[in-house]
């Protein structure tokens, strides 16, 4: 063994002991391993492709895909101006075109946008947007994890529309008889459920109780949102199991464009306490920043929902 003593490392200046106290020792181990700063996520902004007030233009009926490219890019730039990550909710039918337009926006503006296609109608998407805002405030649930499960959460909401005609719909359950009834003279009403599973019934003739789903969110009470010109039919009101007066949503949504009926009225049963529901449905998960964009990723994530970075190993 060598007889040479190891050179002494210079000592960092530290706090001096107060008279009468024991000498203060340096926490050398902590000093050699600086604490990693806590991961702070950038703000996220939830957007609806069918929100007519957000995507408005004088020469256009409104909606993300109906306004000009210049107006769309300018609006997206404003919405991401504070560095926010954008979460765009759209219908499953519009997913391909919304993805194409958002890819152009990413390239032109260098903003982070993720597109989430949902099985519900415009009001169903609105409900998911409000639930998402609550979910992002629940500690321990990174944005990427919440975004990845939004379609699953949306499918658990009871999303029904009341229509006079179903001729513009292309969903399971719409049969030839429904199309013929839509074309015949006279006022008819159809109840069309998208989630939890597609179903079409005539409000006047069919037994609505057959096949329709009552909202259940575990121990969380339910409430009903409604948008559109019609009232909630008494038959549907009984099926929801909610005794409170439905909350009428005033946000301008493209109900007519989605449902193909100028008097389309949409109803969604949602948890009264979204944050508590999220806490039940989404377990707390450890997370770390994405190696490419820095978004918080759950350790179980295989890719980043914002930038598409594929996680090799974590």
Image (tube, rainbow, N blue to C red):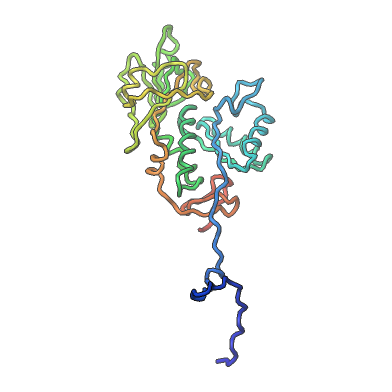
Name the residue at 60% across, 20% down.
Answer: 61
Q: Position of residue 128 (x, y in %)?
A: 46, 34
Left or right for 59, reference 192: right
| Quarter of the image that includes the N terminus | bottom right
On screen, 187 above or below 80? above
Res 187 → quadrant: top left
Left or right for 222, reference 115: left
- Residue occupying the far front of the picture: 19
Q: Position of residue 42 (x, y in %)?
A: 57, 46
On screen, 304 above or below 249? below
Q: Position of residue 72 (x, y in %)?
A: 65, 31
Q: Position of residue 275 (x, y in %)?
A: 42, 40
Q: Count numbered badges in the picture.
A: 0
Res 159 → quadrant: top left
- Residue occupying the far top of the picture: 185
């Amino acid at each position: 063994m060598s007889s040479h003593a190891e050179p002494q490392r210079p000592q960092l200046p530290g706090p001096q002991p107060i008279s009468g106290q024991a000498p203060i020792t340096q926490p050398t181990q902590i000093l050699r391993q600086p604490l990693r700063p806590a991961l702070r996520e950038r703000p996220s902004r939830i957007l609806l492709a069918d929100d007519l007030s957000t995507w408005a233009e004088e020469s256009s009926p409104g909606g993300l895909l109906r306004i000009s490219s210049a107006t769309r890019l300018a609006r997206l730039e404003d919405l991401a101006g504070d560095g926010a990550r954008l979460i765009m909710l759209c219908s499953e039918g519009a997913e391909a075109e919304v993805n194409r337009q958002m890819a152009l926006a990413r390239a032109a503006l260098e903003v982070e946008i993720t597109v989430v296609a949902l099985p519900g109608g415009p009001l169903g998407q609105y409900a998911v947007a409000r639930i998402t805002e609550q979910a992002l405030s629940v500690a321990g649930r990174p944005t990427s994890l919440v975004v990845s499960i939004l379609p699953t959460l949306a499918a658990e909401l009871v999303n029904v529309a009341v229509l006079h005609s179903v001729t513009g719909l292309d969903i399971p359950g719409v049969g030839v008889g429904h199309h013929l009834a839509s074309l015949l003279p006279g006022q008819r009403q159809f109840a069309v459920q998208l989630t939890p599973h597609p179903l079409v019934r005539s409000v006047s003739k069919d037994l609505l109780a057959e096949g329709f789903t009552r909202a259940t969110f575990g121990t969380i009470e339910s409430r009903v949102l409604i948008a559109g010109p019609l009232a909630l039919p008494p038959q549907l009101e009984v099926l929801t199991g909610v005794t409170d007066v439905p909350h009428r949503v005033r946000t301008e949504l493209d109900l007519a464009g989605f449902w193909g009926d100028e008097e389309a009225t949409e109803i969604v049963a949602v948890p009264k306490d979204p944050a508590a529901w999220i806490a039940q449905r989404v377990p707390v998960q450890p997370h770390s920043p994405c190696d490419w964009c820095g978004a918080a990723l759950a350790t179980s994530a295989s890719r980043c929902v914002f930038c598409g970075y594929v996680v090799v190993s974590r």
